[in-house]
Image (spheres, rainbow, N blue to C red):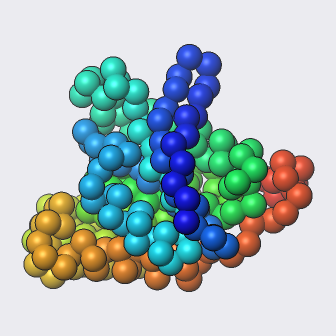
Amino acid sequence: MSETAVRITKGSLSLEGTLGLPAQALGLVVFAHGSGSGRFSPRNNYVARYLQQGRVATLLLDLLTPDEADDRRKVFDIDLLADRVLLAKAWLEQDDRTKDLGIGYFGASTGAGAALQAAARDPSLIQAVVSRGGRPDLAEPYLPAVTAPTLLIVGGDDEPVIEMNRAAYRLLACQKRLIIVPGASHLFEEPGTLEQVAEHALAWFQQHFHPAPHGGAGARTKERSR
């Protein structure tokens, strides 16, 4: 198991991340964090390490630069966050360490909206999506176009978000599941609840990850044109 600091750049934009690569990885999960959070999120790091133990690679990435993170408008700009998720996906498709891995998204809170929008806008190689305490409703216009199997996990005591997830669930036309964790609040701070999130997420990704097509960029171009 190796963890490496990475930097994803585009023009003057530079995003910092941590790439976790277990041996013989089944696939790779990009984390889309919630508002005010980033690659050091303790909850997402816990889930990432759990996934790594199950042979799932992870990319924990700051979707915003430090200056952008101080701008509340950008923190809730789902279109911008989805753009950054897609930038990470494009980088993973080109990097020698990850280009042969199928990709999944794990979105927390507002990050779930960004992950689902990204999955709808560019579905190639996206094999699964998991939302934790997410706001999938923020991607409402895109939900019917999501094709990747999607798991929505919500805390049983997070009542407003439960209803948002139920409404989003009805709009999803892909393979889907909604899990409500009893006794859990929005942040899954109660004992044992975050562990349940990690277990459900790992099982979902393990179920749906399969080898990505080989042959590099040419194979991906062919796949997109089908």
92 w.r.t. 21: above or below: above
Residue 219 position within the rendered picture, expressed as x and y whole percent measured from the top left: 87, 56
Residue occupying image coordinates x 32% and y 64%: 46
Residue closest to the eye, 97 or 86:
97
Q: Is residue 166 visible?
A: no
Residue 5 position within the rendered picture, expressed as x and y whole percent measured from the top left: 51, 43
Residue occupying image coordinates x 73% and y 72%: 211
Which quarter of the figure is the N terminus placed in? bottom right
216 w.r.t. 150: above or below: above
Residue 179 position within the rendered picture, expressed as x and y whole percent measured from the top left: 30, 79
Residue occupying image coordinates x 71% and y 46%: 95
Residue closest to the eye, 46 or 134:
46
Looking at the image, residue 133 sits to the left or right of residue 33; the answer is left
36 w.r.t. 73: above or below: below
Q: Is residue 10 visible?
A: yes
Residue 34 position within the rendered picture, expressed as x and y whole percent measured from the top left: 30, 47
54 w.r.t. 21: above or below: below
Which quarter of the figure is the C terminus placed in? bottom right
Looking at the image, residue 178 sits to the left or right of residue 52; the answer is left
